[in-house]
Image (cartoon, rainbow, N blue to C red):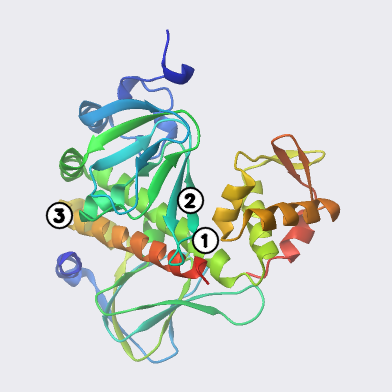
Amino acid sequence: MPSPYNLAIADHCGQCPVRTSHSFCNMEPEPVEALNSIKFNAAYPKGALLFVEGEQPRGVYILCSGRAKLTTSSTEGRTLIVKIANHGEILGASAAILGRPYEVSAEMLEPSQVSFIRREDFLRFLSAYSEACMHTAQQLSEKYEAAQREIRSLGLAHTTSEKLARLLLGWSDEGEVTPQGTRMQVLLTHEEIAQMIGTTRETVTRLLSEFKRKKLISVKGSSLFLLAREQMRDMVSI
Amino acid sequence: MSRSVIETTLADHETLLRFRTGETLFREGEEPRGVYVLHSGTVQLLFAARNGNPKPLREAQPGQILGLSCLVTQRPHDCTATAAEPCEVAFIERGEFLRTLDDSPTVWFSVLRVLSRDVNAAYDDMRVIAAR
């Protein structure tokens, strides 16, 4: 069947093939049915903005597939990526709950299916199902803990190469162990990596070359191999 | 407002603890045993460094609830909390806290508000730190 961006679109939450692997959506049949009745399906292209920092909250967005980057502006005006959100995550929840403007902007990194829920409907959904509250609390706590890790990395690392090493080590936790080293799919540009660790694109390019020269990593296409985990870990003081 | 809802509901289940300056409420890496509601005094949150001294993160003021996120995610504490001055803290044990939530949906919403504010506070810190 034709679909936008050839995405495998799941229309009904009850029939969604990935629902049980998504911690927020993995609920009992009754709340799932309620969720399905209040959400709107949409498909967005890469680069689409779901919401921008400072905007009044319309509601929340569930990433049914794909990834999004959450960005903010530093007090200096530089773009900072606070998080790469994965499929299964719910975005805009803190703004919707507090009734305050969105704290970050959300931009799609690839074509994705997204479910939108209006703020009033979301709040009613929470008050009706404690399971939905628990799952929202988990989402918020995970966002908080991810932010804490970033603060630790940004604030406590002494050098930019230490920050980059920390980022790569973090990615390698989800990488695939191969005889050549831990393989990671890097789907971010050098510019985006720079925005994750608060530096410039030029510095990221220079440091990655330096890491390659020191045989800490190797790059093949969009795959990055971590070759010397222990050495990399020694670069990280926090 | 929301904090007081939580405080009132939990009042029957809490244990009042007193900490002297420099004493530790919980340490980074410890399994969370419950939540801490700060009644009076100031608590300093710190990050342990792999080598060297711990680095200050932010201060918690009376009314703030500590340890909520790791209780929800069931992960170890991600920072250390130390009394910066004499503190009075209400401690609610994990199981007791979760049971109270089951019985009272309005408390759930207050918990979500506290967590939302925590997320926003962390993003505020990031904006400042990234500019340094």
Q: Position of residue B17 (x, y in %)?
A: 31, 82
Q: Which mark is residue B106?
A: 3
**Residue at position x 46%, y 59% from top?**
A147
Residue at horizontal 73%, vertical 34%? A221
Residue B108: image location, x then y, percent:
21, 54
SS type, badge 1: helix
Query: Which residue is painted at 47% across and 63% down in the image?
Result: A148
**Is any part of residue A174 visible from this angle?**
yes
Q: Which residue is mark 1?
A: A150
Labelled pair 2, 1 in contact (Cβ < 8 Å): yes
Q: Which corner quadrant holds the C terminus of chain A?
A: bottom right
Task: Locate the N terminus of chain A by quadrant.
Answer: top left
Q: Which residue is mark 2?
A: A83
Q: Left of A76 or right of it: where is B13? A: left
Answer few, some or many: residues within 10 Å of disc 1's Cα (few below 14, many 20 plus, some between 14 and 19): many
Disc 2 packing (10 Å; few <14; some 14–19; many ≥20): some
Callout 3: helix, strand or loop? helix
